[in-house]
Image (cartoon, rainbow, N blue to C red):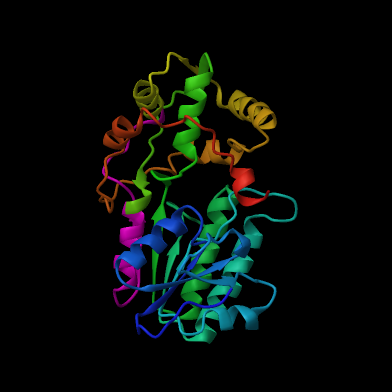
Amino acid sequence: MSDPDSSTGLPLDAVTGAFGYSGGAIAAQLRASERRVRTLTAHPGRAPAGTDIEVRPLDFEDRLRLTEALRGVDTLYNTYWIRFQRGALDHATATARSQVLFQAASDAGVQRVVHLSITHPGTDSPYSYFREKARTEAALVDTGLPHTILRPAILFGGSGVLLNNIAWLLRRLPVFAVGGDGSYRIRGIHVDDLARLCVTEGARTGNAVLDAVGPERPTFDELVRSTAQAVGSRARIVHVPGALLTPVSTALGLLLRDRLLTTDEYHAMSDGLADTDGPATGTTPLSTWLRQEGPTLGRHYANELTRHYR
């Protein structure tokens, strides 16, 4: 694909996965801020016809090629990650690949990195997702590149998967199972709020680490019940032992040819890792969004395996 005309002199930023979910929201915000956008993507064939976003391969096996793909970029916005192990790809793979990306950014002369991490990363976490997120943060810090690390818990809005699929299940199942007592809290941020925060942080100087969270933190039980009300669901919401939840999710996933919820994801959530006590960095209330989007939320199932692997 040929590059768009760069004679406008607009500054150039790079986004990993600009045709995806959070990457797409960041790219849209950058373009609204009159900045040129280049994407590094493993799926260049998914570029929409006529896009003005420059497309480069996200080739972790060729660091020189990756460096050239980042040449001339002011700020790199990194959304790359692997949600769960699939074949030989796991969270440790995501860390190793991210390290290659950060090194290539340094070699290319990128001036700043805005990196999406997770709330409560820790090298001693019992969950590999959170351990490797911590190691990825450390790999970025080790490059010496000026950076902001943003730590969201869950995202909602746009073409998001989690709340859409909760709504889809509530529309179709007579019973919806909540693991444990459902008292663990969820601190979500709207994807557009996250994108605005990313672009703001891309323009700052120095280093920062911020939780990327919205103003509300309902319990998971409250979130499910609010979603049910918003979509007009008559499903009976029941509490089941956590040990039963993941087998049920696995069975549903087999029927849907998807991965709904992993054991680690449930336990991390029930351990409170999707919540923070810090100040809100997003402004959109989850409850308001649910009321507004209820009539259309969950009308269609969002298959994550199809989005990323098929």
Q: What is the total number of numbered labels drawn onto the structure image?
A: 0
- Residue 289 pos. (x, y %): 30, 37
Q: Which residue is depicted at the point 40% across and 56% down?
A: 25
Q: In this rendered view, identify the residue nearer to me: 34 or 157.
A: 34
Q: In this rendered view, identify the residue nearer to me: 2 or 188.
A: 2
Q: Is residue 96 above or below residue 81?
A: below
Residue 211 in view: yes
Residue 210 included in the magenta stretch of the image:
yes
In the image, taking residue 266 as reference, residue 155 lies left or right, namely: left
Q: Which residue is depicted at the point 45% across and 69% down?
A: 52
Residue 179 in view: no
Quarter-of-image position of residue 274: top left
Q: Which residue is depicted at the point 35% across and 47% down?
A: 189
Q: What are the residue bounds of the magenta stretch?
A: 193-220
Residue 18 included in the magenta stretch of the image:
no
- Residue 46 pos. (x, y %): 59, 58
Q: In this rendered view, identify the residue nearer to me: 310 or 108.
A: 310
- Residue 89 pos. (x, y %): 70, 56
- Quadrant housing the N terminus: bottom right
Q: Is residue 198 above or below residue 126?
A: below
- Residue 14 pos. (x, y %): 46, 72
Q: Residue furthest right?
A: 87
In the image, taking residue 257 as reference, residue 137 lies left or right, namely: left
Q: Which residue is depicted at the point 55% across and 64% down?
A: 135
Q: Residue furthest front?
A: 50
In the image, taking residue 139 as reference, residue 182 lies left or right, namely: left
Q: Is residue 244 above or below residue 260?
A: above
